[in-house]
Image (cartoon, helix red, strand yellow):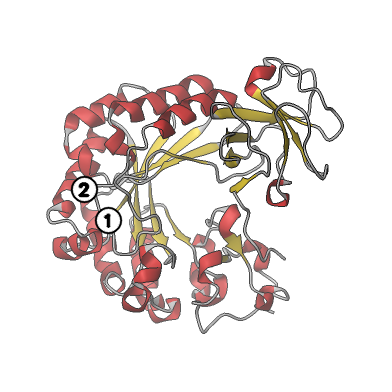
Amino acid sequence: MKTDVTILSDRFATPFDADPMVVCVTSDRSTEIPQHHALLDDEIEDRGDFAVVLKRFNARSSGERIICLPPTLHYLRSGDIIRIAPATGQIWVMYRKESLNNAIFATERCNSWCVMCSQPPKKVDDSELVNDWLKAIPLMSRETKCLGITGGEPTLLGPRLIEIIESCNLHLPQTGLHCLSNGRLFQYLTLAKSVAAVSHPDLVFGIPLYSDIASRHNYTVQIDGAFDQTLRGILNLARVGIQCEIRVVVHRHTFDRLPQLAEFIARNLPFVTHVAWMGYEPIGFGRANLNALWMDPVEYADQLAQACTILRQNAIEQSIYNHQLCVLPQELWDLSRQSISDWKNIYLSACEPCQVRQSCGGFFHSAVANHSRAIAPVL
Protein backbone atom coordinates (compact mmCIF):
# COMPACT_ATOMS: atom_id res chain seq x y z
CA MET A 1 0.00 0.00 0.00
CA LYS A 2 1.60 3.28 -1.10
CA THR A 3 1.29 5.81 1.73
CA ASP A 4 4.20 8.17 1.09
CA VAL A 5 5.60 10.26 -1.73
CA THR A 6 8.82 9.93 -3.71
CA ILE A 7 11.37 12.60 -2.82
CA LEU A 8 12.88 14.22 -5.91
CA SER A 9 15.41 16.52 -4.26
CA ASP A 10 17.67 16.28 -1.24
CA ARG A 11 21.18 17.10 -0.03
CA PHE A 12 24.26 15.00 0.60
CA ALA A 13 26.46 15.62 3.61
CA THR A 14 29.83 16.51 2.06
CA PRO A 15 29.70 19.29 -0.56
CA PHE A 16 32.75 19.88 -2.74
CA ASP A 17 34.02 22.54 -5.11
CA ALA A 18 32.86 21.93 -8.68
CA ASP A 19 30.41 23.31 -11.23
CA PRO A 20 26.83 21.97 -11.30
CA MET A 21 26.51 18.86 -13.46
CA VAL A 22 23.74 16.88 -15.16
CA VAL A 23 24.62 13.17 -15.22
CA CYS A 24 23.02 9.81 -15.89
CA VAL A 25 23.22 7.19 -13.15
CA THR A 26 24.82 3.88 -14.07
CA SER A 27 26.02 0.79 -12.23
CA ASP A 28 28.07 -0.35 -15.24
CA ARG A 29 31.78 0.35 -14.71
CA SER A 30 32.39 -0.03 -18.47
CA THR A 31 29.86 2.64 -19.50
CA GLU A 32 30.82 4.65 -22.55
CA ILE A 33 31.43 8.39 -22.04
CA PRO A 34 31.78 8.05 -18.25
CA GLN A 35 32.21 11.83 -17.93
CA HIS A 36 28.43 12.14 -18.43
CA HIS A 37 27.62 9.48 -15.83
CA ALA A 38 27.49 8.98 -12.08
CA LEU A 39 28.65 5.50 -11.10
CA LEU A 40 26.36 3.89 -8.53
CA ASP A 41 28.70 1.52 -6.74
CA ASP A 42 29.13 0.84 -3.00
CA GLU A 43 32.48 -0.87 -3.40
CA ILE A 44 34.62 1.30 -5.65
CA GLU A 45 36.75 4.12 -4.22
CA ASP A 46 38.38 5.46 -7.38
CA ARG A 47 35.92 7.29 -9.63
CA GLY A 48 38.19 7.05 -12.66
CA ASP A 49 36.68 9.07 -15.52
CA PHE A 50 33.17 9.14 -14.05
CA ALA A 51 31.78 12.53 -13.04
CA VAL A 52 31.07 11.24 -9.51
CA VAL A 53 30.58 8.00 -7.61
CA LEU A 54 27.32 7.49 -5.72
CA LYS A 55 27.10 5.23 -2.67
CA ARG A 56 24.00 4.11 -0.80
CA PHE A 57 25.24 2.31 2.26
CA ASN A 58 28.64 3.65 3.23
CA ALA A 59 28.32 5.63 6.45
CA ARG A 60 30.55 8.37 5.08
CA SER A 61 31.98 9.26 1.73
CA SER A 62 35.70 9.30 1.08
CA GLY A 63 37.89 10.21 -1.84
CA GLU A 64 37.40 12.79 -4.56
CA ARG A 65 33.80 13.25 -5.73
CA ILE A 66 32.47 10.28 -3.77
CA ILE A 67 28.88 11.06 -2.73
CA CYS A 68 26.98 9.19 -0.04
CA LEU A 69 23.32 9.41 -1.06
CA PRO A 70 20.75 10.44 1.55
CA PRO A 71 18.29 7.58 2.31
CA THR A 72 15.51 9.48 0.49
CA LEU A 73 17.38 8.95 -2.79
CA HIS A 74 18.35 5.29 -2.36
CA TYR A 75 15.77 4.42 -5.02
CA LEU A 76 18.02 5.80 -7.78
CA ARG A 77 18.76 3.24 -10.49
CA SER A 78 20.71 2.99 -13.73
CA GLY A 79 19.20 5.26 -16.38
CA ASP A 80 17.96 7.88 -13.94
CA ILE A 81 19.22 11.42 -14.53
CA ILE A 82 20.21 13.81 -11.76
CA ARG A 83 21.50 17.35 -11.43
CA ILE A 84 24.18 17.75 -8.78
CA ALA A 85 25.10 21.15 -7.31
CA PRO A 86 28.36 20.18 -5.56
CA ALA A 87 28.83 23.47 -3.70
CA THR A 88 25.51 23.11 -1.87
CA GLY A 89 25.24 19.32 -1.82
CA GLN A 90 21.91 19.47 -3.67
CA ILE A 91 20.75 16.54 -5.84
CA TRP A 92 17.69 16.98 -8.05
CA VAL A 93 16.21 13.90 -9.71
CA MET A 94 15.28 15.16 -13.18
CA TYR A 95 14.26 11.86 -14.81
CA ARG A 96 13.52 8.32 -13.63
CA LYS A 97 13.89 5.70 -16.32
CA GLU A 98 11.20 3.37 -14.93
CA SER A 99 8.62 6.10 -14.33
CA LEU A 100 5.71 6.82 -16.66
CA ASN A 101 5.39 10.36 -15.28
CA ASN A 102 8.56 12.12 -16.36
CA ALA A 103 8.27 15.80 -17.24
CA ILE A 104 10.52 18.66 -18.28
CA PHE A 105 9.88 21.45 -15.79
CA ALA A 106 10.85 24.24 -18.16
CA THR A 107 10.19 27.45 -16.23
CA GLU A 108 8.63 28.82 -13.05
CA ARG A 109 7.38 31.93 -14.85
CA CYS A 110 3.77 32.28 -16.02
CA ASN A 111 1.57 34.92 -17.63
CA SER A 112 -1.58 33.71 -15.83
CA TRP A 113 -2.38 33.59 -12.12
CA CYS A 114 -4.86 30.73 -11.78
CA VAL A 115 -6.76 30.72 -8.51
CA MET A 116 -6.10 27.00 -7.93
CA CYS A 117 -2.59 26.77 -9.43
CA SER A 118 -0.63 23.93 -7.86
CA GLN A 119 2.69 25.49 -8.96
CA PRO A 120 2.39 29.24 -8.22
CA PRO A 121 4.46 31.28 -10.68
CA LYS A 122 7.61 33.14 -9.74
CA LYS A 123 9.16 36.17 -11.39
CA VAL A 124 12.68 34.77 -11.64
CA ASP A 125 15.43 34.33 -14.20
CA ASP A 126 15.40 30.56 -14.53
CA SER A 127 16.95 30.39 -18.00
CA GLU A 128 19.52 27.86 -16.72
CA LEU A 129 16.69 25.32 -16.45
CA VAL A 130 16.55 25.02 -20.23
CA ASN A 131 20.32 24.51 -20.40
CA ASP A 132 20.05 21.71 -17.85
CA TRP A 133 17.27 20.01 -19.78
CA LEU A 134 19.18 20.26 -23.05
CA LYS A 135 21.97 18.35 -21.31
CA ALA A 136 19.53 15.80 -19.85
CA ILE A 137 17.49 14.97 -22.96
CA PRO A 138 20.32 13.19 -24.85
CA LEU A 139 20.89 11.01 -21.76
CA MET A 140 17.28 9.81 -21.54
CA SER A 141 16.28 6.33 -22.60
CA ARG A 142 15.10 6.15 -26.20
CA GLU A 143 12.43 3.76 -24.92
CA THR A 144 10.71 6.57 -22.99
CA LYS A 145 7.06 6.39 -24.06
CA CYS A 146 5.93 9.88 -23.12
CA LEU A 147 7.52 13.02 -21.75
CA GLY A 148 5.72 16.04 -20.36
CA ILE A 149 6.75 19.68 -20.74
CA THR A 150 5.39 21.89 -18.01
CA GLY A 151 5.93 24.98 -15.88
CA GLY A 152 4.95 27.79 -15.27
CA GLU A 153 4.11 28.62 -18.85
CA PRO A 154 6.49 26.96 -21.35
CA THR A 155 5.57 29.29 -24.25
CA LEU A 156 7.19 32.19 -22.37
CA LEU A 157 10.48 30.56 -23.37
CA GLY A 158 9.81 31.44 -27.01
CA PRO A 159 12.60 30.03 -29.21
CA ARG A 160 14.04 28.08 -26.27
CA LEU A 161 10.87 25.99 -26.13
CA ILE A 162 11.49 25.20 -29.79
CA GLU A 163 15.01 24.08 -28.83
CA ILE A 164 13.57 21.66 -26.27
CA ILE A 165 11.10 20.19 -28.76
CA GLU A 166 13.82 19.91 -31.42
CA SER A 167 16.14 18.14 -28.98
CA CYS A 168 13.41 15.66 -28.07
CA ASN A 169 12.68 15.10 -31.74
CA LEU A 170 16.37 14.37 -32.38
CA HIS A 171 17.26 12.24 -29.36
CA LEU A 172 13.89 10.68 -28.48
CA PRO A 173 12.24 10.09 -31.87
CA GLN A 174 9.76 7.51 -30.53
CA THR A 175 8.72 9.53 -27.46
CA GLY A 176 5.41 11.36 -27.34
CA LEU A 177 5.50 14.92 -26.00
CA HIS A 178 2.66 16.37 -23.93
CA CYS A 179 3.12 20.09 -23.27
CA LEU A 180 0.95 21.87 -20.69
CA SER A 181 0.25 25.46 -21.70
CA ASN A 182 -2.43 28.08 -21.15
CA GLY A 183 -2.38 28.55 -24.92
CA ARG A 184 -2.59 32.33 -24.78
CA LEU A 185 0.62 33.11 -26.68
CA PHE A 186 -0.51 30.88 -29.52
CA GLN A 187 -2.88 33.72 -30.40
CA TYR A 188 0.18 34.77 -32.37
CA LEU A 189 0.21 32.51 -35.41
CA THR A 190 3.99 32.91 -35.81
CA LEU A 191 4.60 30.97 -32.58
CA ALA A 192 2.26 28.18 -33.62
CA LYS A 193 4.02 27.98 -36.99
CA SER A 194 7.42 27.85 -35.29
CA VAL A 195 6.35 24.85 -33.22
CA ALA A 196 4.80 23.16 -36.24
CA ALA A 197 8.01 23.66 -38.23
CA VAL A 198 9.81 21.20 -35.92
CA SER A 199 7.55 18.49 -37.39
CA HIS A 200 7.44 16.47 -34.20
CA PRO A 201 5.35 13.37 -35.01
CA ASP A 202 3.64 13.03 -31.61
CA LEU A 203 3.22 16.42 -29.93
CA VAL A 204 0.09 17.41 -27.99
CA PHE A 205 -0.62 20.68 -26.19
CA GLY A 206 -2.87 20.39 -23.14
CA ILE A 207 -4.69 23.70 -22.74
CA PRO A 208 -7.18 24.63 -19.99
CA LEU A 209 -10.63 25.98 -20.78
CA TYR A 210 -12.61 26.47 -17.60
CA SER A 211 -15.96 27.68 -18.86
CA ASP A 212 -18.05 28.46 -21.91
CA ILE A 213 -18.49 31.97 -20.45
CA ALA A 214 -15.55 34.32 -20.92
CA SER A 215 -15.84 36.07 -17.57
CA ARG A 216 -15.74 32.77 -15.67
CA HIS A 217 -12.66 31.53 -17.47
CA ASN A 218 -10.99 34.92 -17.03
CA TYR A 219 -11.76 34.88 -13.31
CA THR A 220 -10.21 31.44 -12.89
CA VAL A 221 -6.96 32.48 -14.61
CA GLN A 222 -7.16 36.05 -13.20
CA ILE A 223 -6.48 37.67 -16.59
CA ASP A 224 -8.93 39.86 -18.54
CA GLY A 225 -9.19 38.75 -22.15
CA ALA A 226 -7.67 35.32 -21.49
CA PHE A 227 -10.72 33.43 -22.80
CA ASP A 228 -10.46 35.02 -26.26
CA GLN A 229 -6.67 34.63 -26.33
CA THR A 230 -6.90 30.95 -25.39
CA LEU A 231 -9.52 30.20 -28.03
CA ARG A 232 -7.48 31.95 -30.71
CA GLY A 233 -4.47 29.96 -29.56
CA ILE A 234 -6.31 26.64 -29.81
CA LEU A 235 -7.61 27.53 -33.26
CA ASN A 236 -4.14 28.56 -34.45
CA LEU A 237 -2.63 25.30 -33.25
CA ALA A 238 -5.31 23.38 -35.11
CA ARG A 239 -4.69 25.54 -38.17
CA VAL A 240 -1.03 24.45 -38.32
CA GLY A 241 -1.83 20.80 -37.57
CA ILE A 242 -0.79 20.52 -33.90
CA GLN A 243 -2.93 18.33 -31.65
CA CYS A 244 -4.78 19.95 -28.75
CA GLU A 245 -6.28 18.58 -25.57
CA ILE A 246 -8.72 20.57 -23.40
CA ARG A 247 -8.17 20.38 -19.62
CA VAL A 248 -10.84 21.38 -17.10
CA VAL A 249 -10.19 21.61 -13.36
CA VAL A 250 -13.48 21.17 -11.55
CA HIS A 251 -14.11 23.47 -8.58
CA ARG A 252 -16.82 25.67 -7.10
CA HIS A 253 -16.61 28.28 -9.88
CA THR A 254 -16.60 25.81 -12.79
CA PHE A 255 -18.75 22.81 -11.81
CA ASP A 256 -22.26 24.11 -12.52
CA ARG A 257 -21.65 24.74 -16.25
CA LEU A 258 -19.75 21.57 -17.09
CA PRO A 259 -22.59 20.40 -19.40
CA GLN A 260 -22.63 23.76 -21.19
CA LEU A 261 -18.85 23.67 -21.52
CA ALA A 262 -19.08 20.20 -23.05
CA GLU A 263 -21.64 21.53 -25.56
CA PHE A 264 -19.35 24.46 -26.34
CA ILE A 265 -16.42 22.13 -27.02
CA ALA A 266 -18.52 19.80 -29.16
CA ARG A 267 -19.88 22.67 -31.26
CA ASN A 268 -16.82 24.90 -31.56
CA LEU A 269 -13.76 22.70 -30.93
CA PRO A 270 -14.76 19.27 -32.26
CA PHE A 271 -11.22 18.70 -33.57
CA VAL A 272 -9.62 18.41 -30.12
CA THR A 273 -8.02 15.04 -29.50
CA HIS A 274 -9.06 14.69 -25.87
CA VAL A 275 -10.84 16.38 -22.95
CA ALA A 276 -9.57 15.86 -19.40
CA TRP A 277 -11.95 16.46 -16.49
CA MET A 278 -9.59 17.06 -13.59
CA GLY A 279 -10.00 16.84 -9.83
CA TYR A 280 -8.75 19.59 -7.53
CA GLU A 281 -5.17 19.50 -6.18
CA PRO A 282 -5.00 21.26 -2.79
CA ILE A 283 -1.48 22.62 -2.95
CA GLY A 284 -0.02 25.99 -3.90
CA PHE A 285 -2.85 28.44 -4.59
CA GLY A 286 -5.14 25.42 -4.46
CA ARG A 287 -4.40 25.15 -0.75
CA ALA A 288 -4.59 28.90 -0.12
CA ASN A 289 -8.03 29.09 -1.78
CA LEU A 290 -9.26 25.71 -0.57
CA ASN A 291 -12.31 26.94 1.34
CA ALA A 292 -13.46 29.08 -1.57
CA LEU A 293 -12.93 26.53 -4.33
CA TRP A 294 -12.84 22.89 -3.21
CA MET A 295 -15.97 20.77 -3.57
CA ASP A 296 -16.69 17.21 -2.60
CA PRO A 297 -16.80 15.38 -5.95
CA VAL A 298 -20.12 13.76 -5.02
CA GLU A 299 -21.64 17.25 -5.11
CA TYR A 300 -20.85 17.73 -8.81
CA ALA A 301 -21.30 14.13 -9.94
CA ASP A 302 -24.52 14.94 -11.84
CA GLN A 303 -22.98 17.82 -13.80
CA LEU A 304 -19.88 15.76 -14.59
CA ALA A 305 -21.99 12.83 -15.77
CA GLN A 306 -24.05 15.11 -18.04
CA ALA A 307 -20.89 16.64 -19.53
CA CYS A 308 -19.40 13.21 -20.18
CA THR A 309 -22.60 12.06 -21.88
CA ILE A 310 -22.49 15.04 -24.23
CA LEU A 311 -18.91 14.31 -25.26
CA ARG A 312 -19.72 10.61 -25.72
CA GLN A 313 -22.60 11.54 -28.01
CA ASN A 314 -20.20 13.67 -30.06
CA ALA A 315 -17.47 11.00 -30.19
CA ILE A 316 -14.91 13.18 -28.42
CA GLU A 317 -12.30 11.26 -26.43
CA GLN A 318 -12.28 12.12 -22.74
CA SER A 319 -10.90 11.03 -19.37
CA ILE A 320 -11.50 11.78 -15.71
CA TYR A 321 -8.31 12.56 -13.81
CA ASN A 322 -7.51 12.82 -10.10
CA HIS A 323 -10.70 11.17 -8.83
CA GLN A 324 -11.30 8.04 -6.78
CA LEU A 325 -13.67 5.43 -8.21
CA CYS A 326 -15.82 5.34 -5.07
CA VAL A 327 -16.80 9.02 -5.53
CA LEU A 328 -17.81 8.63 -9.19
CA PRO A 329 -21.03 7.22 -10.61
CA GLN A 330 -20.24 3.71 -11.82
CA GLU A 331 -21.17 4.62 -15.40
CA LEU A 332 -18.10 6.92 -15.42
CA TRP A 333 -15.59 4.37 -14.17
CA ASP A 334 -14.47 3.51 -17.69
CA LEU A 335 -13.32 7.14 -18.10
CA SER A 336 -11.34 7.29 -14.87
CA ARG A 337 -7.56 7.19 -15.21
CA GLN A 338 -4.65 6.71 -12.82
CA SER A 339 -3.39 10.15 -13.68
CA ILE A 340 -1.66 11.44 -10.55
CA SER A 341 2.12 11.44 -10.97
CA ASP A 342 3.61 8.45 -9.17
CA TRP A 343 5.88 10.58 -6.99
CA LYS A 344 2.91 12.29 -5.29
CA ASN A 345 0.25 9.57 -5.53
CA ILE A 346 -0.91 7.72 -2.39
CA TYR A 347 -3.82 5.63 -1.09
CA LEU A 348 -5.48 5.80 2.32
CA SER A 349 -5.64 2.94 4.81
CA ALA A 350 -9.37 2.78 4.06
CA CYS A 351 -8.45 1.76 0.51
CA GLU A 352 -6.61 -1.40 1.54
CA PRO A 353 -9.53 -3.87 1.27
CA CYS A 354 -10.97 -2.21 -1.84
CA GLN A 355 -11.54 -4.61 -4.75
CA VAL A 356 -10.94 -1.95 -7.41
CA ARG A 357 -7.93 -0.20 -5.89
CA GLN A 358 -5.63 -1.34 -8.70
CA SER A 359 -7.80 0.60 -11.15
CA CYS A 360 -8.37 3.63 -8.93
CA GLY A 361 -6.64 6.98 -9.33
CA GLY A 362 -5.88 7.31 -5.63
CA PHE A 363 -5.09 10.63 -3.95
CA PHE A 364 -2.69 13.51 -4.18
CA HIS A 365 -0.48 13.40 -1.11
CA SER A 366 -1.64 16.96 -0.43
CA ALA A 367 -5.30 15.86 -0.40
CA VAL A 368 -5.15 13.47 2.55
CA ALA A 369 -6.83 15.96 4.89
CA ASN A 370 -9.39 17.12 2.31
CA HIS A 371 -11.15 14.28 0.62
CA SER A 372 -14.69 13.23 -0.17
CA ARG A 373 -17.06 12.05 2.53
CA ALA A 374 -17.91 9.20 0.14
CA ILE A 375 -14.49 7.52 0.37
CA ALA A 376 -15.11 3.86 1.14
CA PRO A 377 -13.73 0.56 -0.11
CA VAL A 378 -15.62 -1.14 -2.94
CA LEU A 379 -16.18 -4.67 -1.67
Q: Quadrant of residue 183?
A: top left
Q: Element under label 2?
A: helix
Q: Residues within 10 Å of mark 1 (few under 14, many from 20)?
A: many
Q: Which residue is at the front of the view, 44 or 211?
A: 44
Q: Which residue is mark 2?
A: 230
Residue 47 lies, in percent from the top left, at 76, 23
- Secondary structure of the residue carrying tag 1 is loop
Q: Is residue 242 above or below residue 330?
A: above
Q: Are marks 2 and 1 in contact (CB under 8 Å)?
A: yes
Of the residues under marks 2 and 1, which one precedes in the sequence? 1
- Of the 4 image quadrants, the one containing the C terminus is bottom right
Q: Residue at x 25, y 70 (%)?
A: 257
The amino acid type, in three-letter code, at marker 2 is: Thr
Q: Would you name the residue on which mark 1 appears?
A: 209
Q: Where is residue 193? Give x, y as percent.
A: 24, 26
Q: Is residue 118 above or below residue 60?
A: below
Number of marks: 2
Seen from the viewer's position, the closer of residues 375 and 126 is 126
Residue at left offset 65%, top offset 78%? 377
| Residue 331 against residue 242 in the figure, above or below | below
Q: Is residue 314 left or right of residue 66?
A: left
Quarter in which the N terminus is drawn: bottom right
Of residue 47 and residue 100, the one placed in the foreground of this image is 47
Percent from the top left, x then y, of residue 107? 37, 40
Would you say residue 235 is visible in this rendering? no
Asked whether residue 231 appears in the rendered view, the answer is yes
Instruction: Look at the picture and state if 131 lies above or below 60.
Output: above
